[in-house]
Image (cartoon, coloured by chain):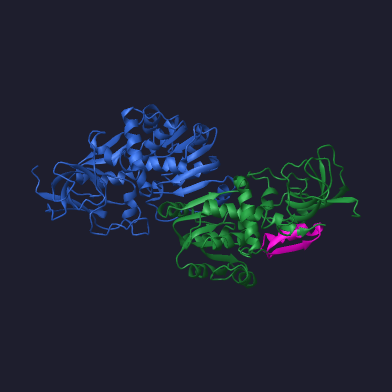
Chain colours: A blue, B green
């Protein structure tokens, strides 16, 4: 390791709508020295995830925003360079929210050791990490899939959606994915084994979705919002469940869509079809992590769950990759190879 | 009993928006004769409830619509005039969906005997019947009230709302009602013991509601929709629950409100605040009827649950009373004294 500088990507300014280069700044600093009760981490893999867009805004949300001038928040897989902390030793691989930077200090809170024998360590921020566990807890606790039901998941080739659909298949459901473009759709049905996949960019997307769900929809795993949500709503069956996990199509929205206001339609359908909408975060089900790791690592080992990573090389390329992700330019779980 | 004719109120035409006199017709027919396995019922108390507006329309809903030319649907408390049915004897008091008419035949399916020792028999379509049980199952199963939480209920002086609020008080919650006008609000706080009540007709209704909920809202029992829903949304706390029971403010709506479309706001709040919206009908929890009757009759006996009936005299006055109810003109559970 020859580096002596720590590159850090800061939130330079809050975006209005689409983030641009000007919202980020790359600065360099000395590599910090761990004090008592601290360890120094070297980032190996940085995870890029849609939730980060929310943390760039100061709108009230489930977490405090990143302050302007602070390092961008991000989960990462890191190597312990040196440690003054019991339980963490030089060479350990750990996972935690160490941010968009080469090096970070940690007091260990919120960090977990990664077991490199389970799968490649980058999966600790992917299929075996936050996105995979989000899929697992949201589908099983809120979706409550039953064999024979129809499950629809958007962003189906992505980190969360691909796991949702494959777990639903394991539970005996018919699974319909929604993805952007024929290449992703082919992957979703061919590699991931979904029963069908519909391209949301198609002009007749809503009709195609309806045709792909001849028995309606029992579970819609919501991580998109926008036009996809509008196409799903009329297809929901009696007693359908909608885990609300993300709304990537809305994150860059600067004003509400034109009217009319469809709230009365949503409420009417909720009542007459006895729908359940429930928002959640993976942290709400933190106690299910052991079960998740056990099940998911088993399914990966057995070949029942596959995953795909979209690897970006170099920390300096993180902002552009992140901006592209908000438009679906990634293909698979987006990770940055930092070191 | 001197009557020889059976008066029946039919759905004459489907309403577009507000129902009017022309949507109903009063016809007379011979009193029917019960065949084998049937009983003849004489209606004593007819219940008028908001859900009936939905059944007048042919829009897809949880139940089939009333056909044009058929007797209007309605729950009623009746006396058995004569019976060829085991288990039902002349003089028994029964409750079931016998419709807007003086007399009806029944094969017993869906009918239950009423225990006149529990409370006045009219309560079998009120606080001890469908509205009371709707409040009970929706609040307890979906709302899941915890002591110290804030519960908001609209139509607070009505059949469902008054029961919701009083049960929530029994469960240790702070309860804020919403009602139309100072007289109803005074009743809600004075008689029913709610902690506060806000008049939704006030120009500064949303501000008043906010002031009445200094700790936000943990449970919103939705039976109104419209502007009340809009005022409640920003006040919902993290992990708030919204049992969706009715939408009386929307039932006569003929077109959607002007934009913008607030669906993205609702979804965003659902996600960031991890809200639960769940539609339900009392029939979804039919197995809880014994617990409901035990608890609710006990609470009435102990004076912990009070109820108020708005009695309309004469079947012929049912249509006008029903139309008035859709504007909140009733004060308490609306029942028609038929005989």
Q: Position of residue A61 (x, y in %)?
A: 37, 57
Q: Position of residue A155 (x, y in %)?
A: 39, 39
Q: Position of residue B4 (x, y in %)?
A: 91, 51
**Can see residue B85?**
yes
**Can see residue A263?**
no
Q: Is residue B243 magenta?
A: no
Is B41 left or right of B173, judged from the image as shown?
Answer: right
Count of all numbered marks drawn on residues in the image: 0
Is A132 left or right of B128, judged from the image as shown?
Answer: left
Q: Residue at (43%, 31%) from the top-left corner?
A: A169
Image-quadrant location for residue A294: top left
Q: Is residue A115 above or below residue B322?
A: above
Q: Position of residue A109 (x, y in %)?
A: 24, 52
Q: Is residue B330 magenta?
A: yes
Is B79 left or right of B159, judged from the image as shown?
Answer: right
* Towards the viewer: B36 or B160: B36
Q: Which quadrant of the figure contains the N terminus of chain A?
A: top left
Q: Is residue B183 above or below residue B156?
A: below
* Towards the viewer: A222 or A20: A222
Q: Is residue B10 above or below residue B187?
A: above
Q: Which residues are magenta?
A: B308-335
Is B315 left or right of A2, judged from the image as shown?
Answer: right
* Towards the viewer: B184 or B43: B43
Q: Which quadrant of the figure contains the C terminus of chain A?
A: top left
């Amino acid at each position: 390791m020859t580096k002596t500088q720590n590159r850090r990507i800061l939130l330079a300014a809050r975006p209005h709508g689409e983030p641009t280069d000007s919202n980020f700044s790359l600065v360099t600093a000395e590599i910090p020295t761990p004090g008592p009760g601290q360890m120094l981490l070297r980032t190996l893999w940085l995870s890029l995830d849609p939730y980060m867009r929310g943390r760039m805004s100061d709108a009230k949300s489930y977490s405090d925003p990143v302050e302007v001038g602070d390092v961008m928040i991000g989960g990462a897989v890191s190597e312990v360079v040196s440690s003054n902390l019991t339980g963490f030793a030089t060479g350990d691989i750990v996972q935690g929210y160490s941010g968009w930077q080469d090096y970070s200090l940690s007091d260990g809170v919120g960090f977990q050791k990664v077991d490199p024998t389970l799968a490649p360590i980058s999966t600790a921020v992917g299929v075996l990490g936050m996105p995979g566990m989000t899929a697992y807890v949201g589908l099983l606790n809120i979706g409550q899939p039953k064999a024979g039901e129809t499950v629809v998941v958007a962003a189906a080739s992505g980190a969360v959606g691909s796991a949702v659909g494959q777990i639903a298949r394991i539970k005996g459901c018919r699974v319909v994915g929604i993805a952007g473009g024929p290449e992703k759709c082919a992957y979703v049905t061919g590699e991931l084994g979904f029963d069908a996949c519909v391209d949301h960019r198609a002009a007749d997307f809503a009709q195609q979705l309806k045709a792909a769900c001849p028995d309606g929809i029992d579970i819609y795993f919501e991580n998109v919002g926008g036009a996809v949500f509008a196409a799903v709503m009329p297809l929901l069956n009696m007693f359908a469940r909608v885990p609300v996990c993300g709304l990537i199509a809305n994150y860059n929205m600067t004003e509400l869509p034109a009217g009319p206001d469809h709230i009365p339609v949503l409420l009417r359908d909720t009542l007459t079809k006895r729908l359940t909408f429930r928002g959640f975060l993976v942290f709400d089900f933190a106690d299910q992590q052991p079960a998740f790791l056990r099940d998911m690592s088993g399914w990966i080992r057995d070949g029942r769950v596959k995953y795909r990573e979209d690897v970006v090389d170099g920390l300096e390329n993180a902002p552009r990759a992140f901006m592209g992700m908000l438009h679906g330019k990634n293909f698979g779980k987006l990770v940055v190879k930092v070191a």
